[in-house]
Image (cartoon, helix red, strand yellow):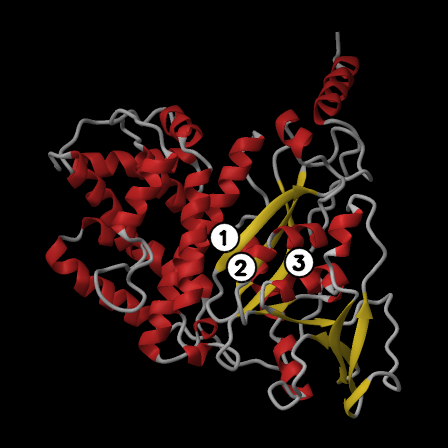
Amino acid sequence: MKNTKVARIRHKVSMLKQQFLQSDAGLFDQALGEQEIEAVMRELVEPHRERIYPPLDTLRLFVGQVLSADRACQDVVGRRLSERVAQGQSLSALNTPSAYCEARQRLPTTVPVALNTMIGGRLEAMTPAAWRWQGRCVKLFDGTTVTMPDTPSNQKTYPQSREQKPGLGFPIARIGALIGLSSGAMLAYQVAACKGKGTGEQSLLMNMLDQLNKEDVLLADALLATWWIIHGAMNRGADIVMPQHGVRITDFALGQRLGKSDHLMQWPRPPKPKMMTAEEYATYPEFITMREVKINGRILVTTLLDPAFAPARALAALYAMRWNIEVDFRTIKATLEMDVLRCKSQPMVDKEIAVYFLAYNLVRWAMAKAALLADILPRMLSFAGAKRLLGTFADQLRRTSDDQVRTLIATVTACMATLRLPHRPDRIEPRAKKRRPKNLPLLTMPRQAARDLIYAQRSLNRVP
């Protein structure tokens, strides 16, 4: 039992750090610095009394909840009760999870968002040069969607598809994410509805261009290869590699020839958008210089103009790595089971997404530590295996004394380094399911209306 407030905070931070193999030494042992966490909590959390679920414990339990196989709040309450008993504290109620749910509501969404941004940026910045593309940091962007319970609060902010009748669909949110290629860390993200102005992937990426640093390389698909996005990246000192947008015509007979199907072109500034003032429009250059290169039947556009630094085949190999973000989204949505959220109000949905991404980054940090130990790339390790291993040892790490925790962390790290993915460069799988679902009809009316209809039919069939 810790007697002072400072000691209690350090103990809570230590429990969170140990869960993700954080000790006091090594390149990847400072994801969760005590001073940084204390600074975030002081800035974003209002003064509070010591409850059964104080903010830092609530955050730790929330992270453990999204990583666990049983994501029920009742399971979290049971684990919290076992912690308090082990620490000689008073018992907490087990028959209701309402106190924990209320603690999650009190926790500001800005706390997991700030910690996630700090951890992701720090992890990507600390990656060795050997993990990067020609020594440069490559950042991937793409979008995905998640659904959530059909409640008025969720429907108001993230309305369902127009193709579905009211009461038959689920609220759906679009997430645009910037992920580091070398580390796999979530660097930044934005959440929006799937319809309405400013909710498309182009708008989400424009809002995150300030996350690009000088000499970064942005990888994205053809939808994002617009003049405004490319200029925004160049203005930050970053380069881009993307496929040619479908509406743009490429003629290799024009421009400055660099090689076969490889040339430089001047892209003119598009017409002024309606929402932009004439003064702001005049600040943009009339042309930007772009390189267009055809390789393996695909035309790539890039601001890497020097063919000696970035040959055509190197660009093609780099763009092929964009598929990693698709794998990352599959990891987040399938392995972490984030494809269907559980919270029933919009503020809690936003908080749940932030905690999922924080948990994802913490696992990625442990994987980077194991990869450095094994002298391999982090993406050669299994995320699902790393998540299982951390879950298996979580309780043991929490109970281990300070004298033995470093030995246990070293053991878990060494085990994680063995979880290598098989090398399957030519693997092809059909996008189809072999296992047939149950042949149930689709629900074509609101669930309550369907219940009322069943009750009415039973009443008619009842024998007097």
Which residue is drawn at the image coordinates 76% and 63% (left, top)? 227
The front one of 260 and 254 is 254
| Residue 68 in sight from this viewpoint | no
- Crowd tier of the residue under label 1, counting other residues whose Cα lies within 10 Å: few below 14, some 14–19, many 20 or above: many
Q: CA distance from mark 2 to mark 1?
A: 7 Å
Q: Earlier in the sequence, mark 2 or mark 1?
A: 2
Q: Is residue 168 above or below residue 278?
A: above
Q: Position of residue 84 (x, y in %)?
A: 21, 34
**Closer to us: 90 or 321:** 321
- Residue 413 in the image: above or below residue 55: below
What residue does disc 1 label? 336
Query: Which of 147/42 is in front?
Result: 42
Mark 2 touches mark 1? (CB < 8 Å): yes
The residue at which mark 3 appears reads as 435
Numbered label attached to residue 207: none
Location of the N terminus by quadrant is top left
Amino acid type indicated by mark 3? Arg
First-in-chain label (3 vs 2) = 2
Instruction: Tell me the residue at 78%/45% (across/down).
Output: 277
Query: Could you tell me which secondary element the residue under label 3 belongs to?
Result: loop
**Number of residues whose C-alpha sits closer than 10 Å to that of mark 2, classed few (under 14), some (14–19) or many (20 or more):** some
